């Protein structure tokens, strides 16, 4: 679930950057872009930690 949320937030970030590059219009400013990218990163780290914990439980370690 967190991995899909991370992907969704990153798509919002990418859409903002692409719209700024191609259409000279952005949804977020510099701080907004940083916060969106930070949220995507945090969600990705949560997803990876959950996968590692599930793998550890599966292996009994």
Image (tube, rainbow, N blue to C red):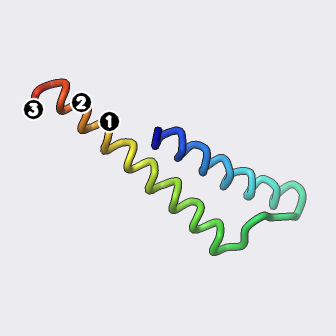
* Residue with the mark numbered 2: 55
At label 3, counting other C-alpha atoms closer than 10 Å, the crowd grade (few under 14, some 14-19, many 20 or more) is few
x and y percentages locating residue 10 in the rendered image:
60, 49
Q: Mark 1 points at which residue?
A: 51
Along the polypeptide, which appears first: circle 3 or circle 1? 1
Q: Helix, strand, or loop for circle 2?
A: helix
Secondary structure of the residue carrying numbered label 1? helix
Q: Are there few (<14), some (14-19), or many (20+) residues within 10 Å of tag 1?
A: few
Q: In this view, does 57 lie to the left or right of 51?
A: left
Q: Which of marks 2 and 3 is nearer the N terminus?
A: 2
Q: Which residue is at a point 63% across and 74% down the rendered structure image?
A: 31
Which quarter of the image is occupied by the C terminus?
Answer: top left
Is residue 30 toward the left or the right of residue 54 in the image? right
Image spot of residue 59 (x, y percent)? 15, 25
- In front of the other: 16 or 43: 43
Q: Which residue is drawn at 19% across and 25% down?
A: 58
Residue receiving disc 3 = 61
Question: For residue 55, which quarter of the picture?
Answer: top left
Observer-nearest of 50 and 37? 50
Residue closest to the eye, 19 or 57? 57
Mark sitting on residue 4: none
User: Would residue 4 appear left or right of 32 to someone viewing this image?
Assistant: left
Q: Are marks 2 and 1 in contact (CB under 8 Å)?
A: yes
Query: Residue pushed farthest front?
Result: 1
Marks 3 and 1, how far apart at CA: 14 Å
Q: Mark 3: which secondary structure?
A: loop
* Residue 50, above or below 35: above
Give the CA separation, mark 2 to mark 3: 9 Å
């Amino acid at each position: 679930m967190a991995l899909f949320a991370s992907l969704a937030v990153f798509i919002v970030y990418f859409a903002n950057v692409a719209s700024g590059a191609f259409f000279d219009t952005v949804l977020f400013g510099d701080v907004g872009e940083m916060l969106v990218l930070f949220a995507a990163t945090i969600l990705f780290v949560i997803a990876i930690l959950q996968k590692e914990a599930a793998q550890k439980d599966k292996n009994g370690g």
